[in-house]
Each structure stands twice: as structure tokens, then as C-alpha cells.
Amino acid sequence: MRAVRAAGSRKSSRSRVFRIKVISMGETAVGKSCLIKRYCEEKFIQKYIPTIGVDYGVKPIKLGEYDLRVNLWDMAGSQDYIEVRNEFYKDSQGCILVYDVTSRATFESLPAWLNECKENGAENMVIFVAATKCDLLNRKVTEKEGRDWAQSQGFMYFEVSALNSQNVKPLFTALFARMLSTIPGVPQELAAAAVQLAKETRDD
């Protein structure tokens, strides 16, 4: 009888783990890797090291009785890796679409990134726009331009800085909350806990 209860306990424990898949999209050197590293490790890497293909990491988050495991796929922006990227769009549930406010070309490329993900099987994916390097003064894209474009697509918009961590946590926690509110089969209490975390992070 004890063995049966123990097995049931293990099964219950496993059932509290929930996984979601998030990808990053955007041109080379817009700061996708720095943004993810700032959120996951609370570090900023000054030296630019381009991503080769795809980088992967897992961010665990405790939400009430649930252990949320966020699988983060940081995709290289170079066109040399388009065939590699195309393998990761399908089944992605969330995306951070990134551009650099000091580079108009990276902003103007955003529609092409949307086309690429749609052509390669991304469906019902929650997309948030992250305008990086907002701490710099030599910006080429105004906040109004970026916000208006994001709103025209139905996307949430955040101005962020991996250097000083501005809006980094609010971006990620809001994305996770929106994802968990739209993914079928997510327990109501998990979705509610994610919304609460996003609110607390935003109010900090």
C-alpha cells in the first residue's frame, strides 16, 4: 500500500511541472542574447559574441504549486542560419521580436521576420516587441514609431536595456502571463499566478 501511495505522490509531483517554449527573433547584433542573459542570469556581457545557429537555455520559475520551465531558444539573426532557424518556429508558443532603437534597418526588418516565422509553421504564437538599447542617446527609431507599429500588429511593446536592466523582467513576466492565458490546458491557478507575478514585477 505504501508503494502505491509513493508512486502516486511522484506522479502528482511531476504533474506540477509545466513547460513553455519561447524564441527570440531579430537581426544580428540587436541584443537578443544580452536580453536573455540579463533576464536569466542578471548579467550583462559588454563584448559582442554573435550566436552561432541557435542557443538554448531553461529558466525555472516557481509559481505557487507549479514549477514553470521556460525553454528559451535564442536564434541567430544572420541569413546564414535561416535553415537552422526554420526548424524552431513550429510549436513555439511565445516570441520576443527584437530590434535596436539605434538602427532603423533592424526596425524596418520586423515584417520580414514575421513572414519568415509564419512561412515556417509558427501558429498562435504570442509575440511581444522589444526595442533594445533604449539607454543610448543616438536612437534612430522613436518610441512612438515602435509602439505604433507594435500596436498595429496587435503586439505588446517594451523599451528595454540589457545594460541597466530597464523593463527586462516586466517584458518576460508579461510575456509568460499572456502565453499561459492563451495556451490550451493550462491550469487556471497557474495562469493566475503568472498574471500576479507580472503585476508585481511591473509595479516594482
Image (spheres, grey):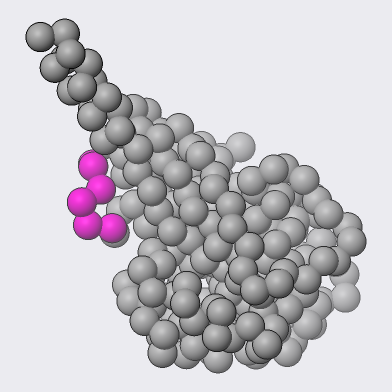
Above or below residue 71? Residue 131 is below
Above or below residue 178? Residue 60 is above
Above or below residue 170? Residue 93 is below
- Residue 58 appears at what percent x and percent y? 54, 48
Q: Nearer the viewer, residue 168 or 183?
A: 183
Quarter in which the C terminus is drawn: top right
Query: Residue most toward the top?
Result: 2
Residue lying at 64% horizontally and 46% vertically, measured from the top left = 40
- Residue 120 appears at what percent x and percent y? 41, 85
- Residue 51 appears at what percent x and percent y? 72, 69
Residue lying at 36% horizontally and 68% vertically, measured from the top left = 91
Please tell me in which quadrant of the rendered image residue 46 appears: bottom right
- Report the magenta residues as a range: 183-188
Residue lying at 35% horizontally and 38% vertically, measured from the top left = 17
Main SS class of the magenta portion in the image: loop
Residue lying at 48% horizontally and 49% vertically, measured from the top left = 70
Q: Nearer the viewer, residue 52 or 102?
A: 52
Query: Residue most toward the left?
Result: 1
Quarter in which the N terminus is drawn: top left
Look at the image and tell me whether residue 68 can be seen. yes
**Magenta stretch containing residue 166, yes or no?**
no
Above or below residue 122? Residue 165 is above
Look at the image and tell me whether residue 170 can be seen. no
Left or right relative to 23: residue 39: right
Q: Give the total of numbered labels.
A: 0
